[in-house]
Image (cartoon, rainbow, N blue to C red):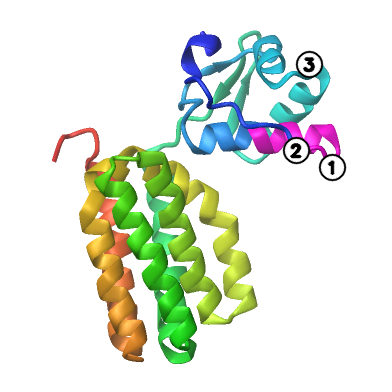
């Protein structure tokens, strides 16, 4: 049941500005991305509406939009279910992510100033703290912020827009392996910061490619215990 599948405090508050259907969409997408609503989980309109404190109509509209975007499957006579990504889907997206972020790392090494490097170091320190506290959700969010900062330092608007299109799915795939990647992921972040600080474009590219490939391989190995 949906009500049993949502941890206490998992439902985000709906912000006032903007159309209600958009706010419901964002709330449901956040629940899916963080896996509070898990792949394959049945989504009952009335229960979702009750959790979010809205009528069923904006929930129905949000589910239709999420279906169009591939986050939710609408099955005839069965209802809505959180999409269960195939291994091929995950592999394709994480491969594209590697290409985008490797180029971002190269550009960041070419353009980042001392303030940008300091910002990366602060994000990394916070991520290390969250890992030490076993705050998986916090570490996942901080990981996204770290990579977004690298993308910002790259200074390429088109590249950033492309990365934004895959960012939420990257979080979706990263969440179940965040604890497994743990401290090692942030060690790799530290190495990347050093390359960016040293304006080592080739080294930054290589490190980011290796880093994102580690995540991709970890995702595929998650069910084998390897």
Report the residue marked by disc 2: 15
Tell which tag, 2 or 1, sits nearer the viewer. 2
Find numbered disc 1 in the image and state the secondary structure of the residue it sits on. Answer: loop
Q: Please tell me which of labels 3 and 2 falls first in the chain.
A: 2
| Vertical side of 49 occupied by 171: above or below | below
Report the residue marked by disc 3: 56
For the residues labelled 1 and 3, the Cα–Cα distance comes to: 18 Å
Report the residue marked by disc 1: 18
In the rendered structure, the answer to whether residue 98 lies left or right of residue 207 reads right
Residue 3: image quadrant is top right
Q: Work out whether residue 178 or residue 208 is closer to the camera in this orientation and state it.
A: 178
**Callout 1–callout 3 Cβ contact below 8 Å:** no
Q: Please tell me which of labels 1 and 3 falls first in the chain.
A: 1
Which residue lies at the image location 39% right of the left edge and 60% below the top edge? 95
For the residues labelled 2 and 1, the Cα–Cα distance comes to: 8 Å
**Callout 2–callout 1 Cβ contact below 8 Å:** yes
Find numbered disc 2 in the image and state the secondary structure of the residue it sits on. Answer: loop
Q: Which residues are magenta?
A: 16-27
Mark 3: give few (<14), some (14-19) or many (20+) Cα within 10 Å.
some
Question: For residue 100: magenta?
Answer: no
Residue 91 percent across, percent down from the top left: 37, 50
Q: Does residue 88 appear in this view?
A: no
**Callout 3–callout 2 Cβ contact below 8 Å:** no
Q: What predominant SS class does the magenta segment belong to?
A: helix
Name the residue furthest left.
Answer: 226
């Amino acid at each position: 049941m949906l009500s049993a599948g949502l941890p206490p405090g998992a439902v985000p508050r709906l912000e006032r500005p903007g159309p209600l259907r958009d706010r419901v969409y964002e709330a449901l997408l956040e629940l899916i991305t963080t896996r509070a609503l898990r792949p394959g989980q049945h989504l009952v309109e009335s229960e979702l509406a009750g959790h979010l404190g809205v009528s069923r109509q904006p929930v129905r509209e949000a589910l239709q939009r999420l279906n169009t975007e591939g986050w939710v499957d609408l099955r005839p006579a069965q209802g809505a279910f959180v999409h269960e990504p195939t291994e091929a889907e995950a592999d394709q997206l994480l491969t594209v992510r590697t290409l985008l972020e490797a180029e971002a790392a190269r550009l960041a090494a070419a353009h980042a100033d001392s303030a940008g490097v300091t910002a990366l170091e602060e994000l990394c320190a916070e991520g290390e703290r969250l890992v030490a506290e076993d705050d998986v959700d916090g570490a996942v969010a901080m990981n996204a912020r770290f990579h977004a900062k690298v993308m910002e330092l790259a200074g390429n608007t088109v590249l950033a827009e492309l990365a934004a299109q895959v960012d939420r799915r990257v979080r979706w795939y990263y969440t179940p392996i965040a604890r497994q990647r743990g401290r090692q992921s942030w060690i790799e972040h530290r190495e990347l910061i050093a390359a960016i600080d040293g304006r080592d474009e080739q080294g930054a590219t290589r490190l980011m490619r290796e880093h994102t490939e580690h995540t991709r391989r970890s995702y595929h190995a998650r069910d084998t215990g390897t």
